[in-house]
């Protein structure tokens, strides 16, 4: 019990230590110009329908959605106690995403959540070097995450740890990753600023001789609602550590490494936009735009609405249902369906910050 009291009294100091570790990790992280390969790319795909509908990224929307905790553990503070969520994403062909999560409020001690995500690519037929069929095999990626948040005045600090694995037939790799995030709210939650260092960690087992790195990312975002306007806006900056990347022409022609798209286009590549139209307290229309997705998917045969996403959220008592559509491939539209439910308390009535 003395250890728990020590952690509670010195949580800010411990949290600062974690941030210092992040800075050290960033300094030691390999640059993108080295001969390396990113792995666990499924961690960069929007987990829930709310995130997908708002441009694919959001780390500052602190309004009770459990699936957004996967984007920033500090957002756990606003989730009602004893909530459970299931999120499903149809990716393309036989690929699909499943996400389960549950949270528990520890009152003044903070909040804790457990989540499971699985990305299944379907079943494939294997062949040897002579073309002989060797049977079927499956490919999937899985992550198990534990998250914790604690509020100190207007600041909320959050930390999560995640075990990830990648399975391809008889080959597999695994790793241990951490997210460290924080939010700061002003004017009665009308303005919320969020920051998150995502996927800090290591590969524990590698299935290839090539060096693999985790998809580390630093994100900064803001959510705000004008005084008399029934719209809530969100702007999120992504990949802010490695700001310059290689670029490719929409027609498919590879552009030189020294090519620069200009300041405006380069900034837009790292920003996603989202807006929520608050029809009623229980009905929300969501819209989003991701310029990077638009540029990466554009070609001569693609349709005009690449990078644009949208969705609808309806809350009925203790249940919230949300749906969204987005584009991650030029040939299909991806569908997201999410359900969140506040379970009835089996013990005494509890309260949580909303």
Image: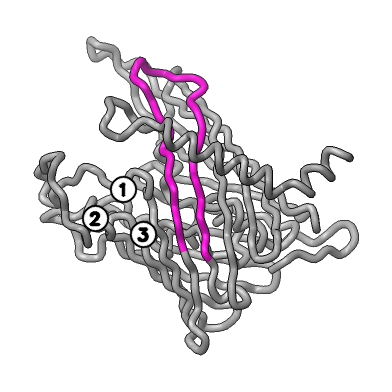
Measuring from the top left, give residue 315's x and y in whole percent. 61, 72
Disc 1 and disc 3 in contact, CB within 8 angstroms = no
Disc 1/disc 2 C-alpha distance (Å): 8 Å
Circle 1 SS class:
loop
Q: Residue at x 60, y 73 (%)?
A: 189
Q: Earlier in the sequence, mark 2 or mark 3?
A: 2
Give the labeled residue for mark 3.
326
Residue 181 lies left or right of residue 317; in this view the side is left
Which marked residue is nearer to the observer: mark 2 or mark 3? Answer: 2
Label ID, residue 266: 2
Disc 1/disc 3 C-alpha distance (Å): 24 Å
Front-lying residue, 241 or 343: 241
Q: Residue at x 13, y 55 (%)?
A: 301
Q: In the rendered structure, which segment of residues is drawn in magenta?
A: 193-221
Disc 1 and disc 2 in contact, CB within 8 angstroms = yes
Circle 2 SS class:
helix
């Amino acid at each position: 019990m003395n250890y728990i009291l020590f952690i509670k009294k010195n949580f800010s100091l411990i949290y600062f230590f974690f941030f210092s570790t992040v800075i050290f990790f960033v300094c030691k992280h390999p640059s993108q110009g080295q001969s390396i390969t990113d792995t666990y790319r499924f961690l960069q795909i929007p987990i829930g329908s709310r995130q997908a509908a708002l441009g694919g990224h959001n780390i500052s929307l602190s309004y009770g959605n459990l699936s957004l905790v996967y984007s920033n553990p500090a957002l756990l503070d606003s989730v009602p106690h004893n909530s459970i969520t299931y999120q499903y994403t149809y990716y393309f062909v036989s690929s699909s995403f499943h996400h389960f999560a549950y949270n528990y409020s520890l009152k003044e001690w903070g909040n804790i959540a457990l989540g499971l995500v699985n990305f299944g690519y379907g079943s494939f037929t294997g062949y040897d070097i002579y073309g002989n069929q060797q049977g079927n095999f499956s490919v999937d990626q899985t992550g198990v995450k534990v998250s914790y948040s604690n509020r100190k005045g207007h600041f909320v600090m959050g930390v999560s740890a995640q075990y990830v694995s990648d399975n391809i037939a008889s080959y597999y790799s695994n790793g241990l990753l951490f997210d460290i995030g924080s939010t700061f709210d002003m004017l009665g939650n009308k303005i919320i600023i969020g920051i998150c260092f995502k996927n800090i960690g290591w590969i524990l087992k590698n299935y290839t001789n090539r060096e693999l790195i985790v998809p580390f990312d630093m994100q900064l975002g803001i959510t705000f609602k004008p005084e008399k306007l029934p719209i809530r806006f969100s702007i999120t900056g992504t990949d802010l550590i490695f700001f310059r990347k290689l670029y490719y022409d929409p027609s498919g022609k590879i552009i030189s490494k020294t090519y620069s798209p200009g300041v405006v286009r380069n900034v837009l590549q790292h920003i996603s936009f989202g807006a929520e139209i608050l029809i009623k307290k229980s009905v929300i229309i969501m819209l989003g735009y991701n310029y990077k997705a638009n540029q990466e998917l554009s070609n001569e045969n693609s349709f005009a609405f690449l990078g644009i996403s949208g969705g609808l959220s309806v809350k009925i008592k203790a249940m919230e249902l949300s749906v969204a559509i987005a584009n991650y491939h030029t040939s299909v539209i991806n569908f997201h369906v999410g359900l969140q439910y506040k379970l009835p308390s089996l013990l005494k009535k509890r309260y949580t910050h909303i």
